[in-house]
Image (tube, rainbow, N blue to C red):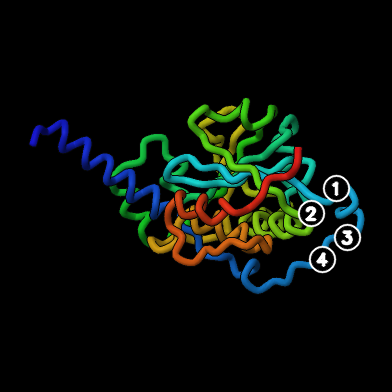
Amino acid sequence: MPRLLLAARVAIATLATAMLASCAPGLPPSVATKPVLPPPPHFLTNSTEVTIGVLDEGWHTGLVLPVGALGPSLDHLRHWFPEAKYLAYGWGNRNFYIATHPGPGMAIDALFPSSSVVFVEGLSKHPKNALPPDAHLRWICVSRTAVWRLDAYLGDYLRMGPSEDPVSLAPGPFPGSRFFASTGTYDAFHTCNTWTAAALKFADLPVSDEGVLFAGQVMSEIRPLRSCPE
């Protein structure tokens, strides 16, 4: 086998392993045990339903929320992204996700329980005009109560500093993006796609996170969900 072809196959295998294992979350204890208080009346009166996005980038899935729908758990992020109309969220292994040139060693380390990171990108335009053309975004319609629960889920994955502000780790790879410290841990049996499915399940949507490892499984889970009327 030619050396270049072998190197390419090794690189692809390493990337695949890393993308699956390095974005694996352990559920923060606060999410697993803390009851979510019902939303206050003023949160429910803005609108009855909200459109949120599930982002499919091939190996990786994430969530896109309109800034106007954010609840108290994510209000801490507003001053980081003052011009944003939408926030896109991702989740990954801290060392691998932040690294400019991640290597095989990082990919192997990511298979074992390790620190995590939340990726947030502020989008000043509608996502269809702000995200790459090859990014697939599926819009789904959810209740305000579901958004409230989703807000709590995402907020509990943000590690807060002494001033009760999310701990910023580094700028992200795109303009208007940033990495924040996360409360979750990783292992090879739960992926970022599990995290996305678990978030939607926590929001009381008819979605299962059991056995979800790949982006395609997440998109299959949300396929029956409806979009909001335009």
Real-space CA distance between mark 3 and mark 4, rounded to the nearest whole angstrom:
6 Å
Neighbours of disc 4 within 10 Å: few (<14), some (14-19), many (20+):
few
Amino acid tagged 1: Ser
Neighbours of disc 2 within 10 Å: few (<14), some (14-19), many (20+):
many
Please give the residue where the numbered disc 4 appears in the rendered image: 38
- Of badges 2 and 3, the one in the foreground is 2
| Disc 3 to disc 4: CB gap under 8 Å | yes
| Disc 1 to disc 2: CB gap under 8 Å | yes
Label 2 SS: helix
| Disc 1 to disc 4: CB gap under 8 Å | no
Please give the residue where the numbered disc 1 appears in the rendered image: 47
Q: Is there any visible trace of residue 93 in the rendered image?
A: no
Q: Where residue 185 sits: x, y (%)?
A: 49, 61
- Of badges 1 and 4, the one in the foreground is 1
Real-space CA distance between mark 1 and mark 4, rounded to the nearest whole angstrom:
16 Å
Q: Nearer the viewer, residue 74 or 180?
A: 74
Q: Earlier in the sequence, mark 1 or mark 3?
A: 3
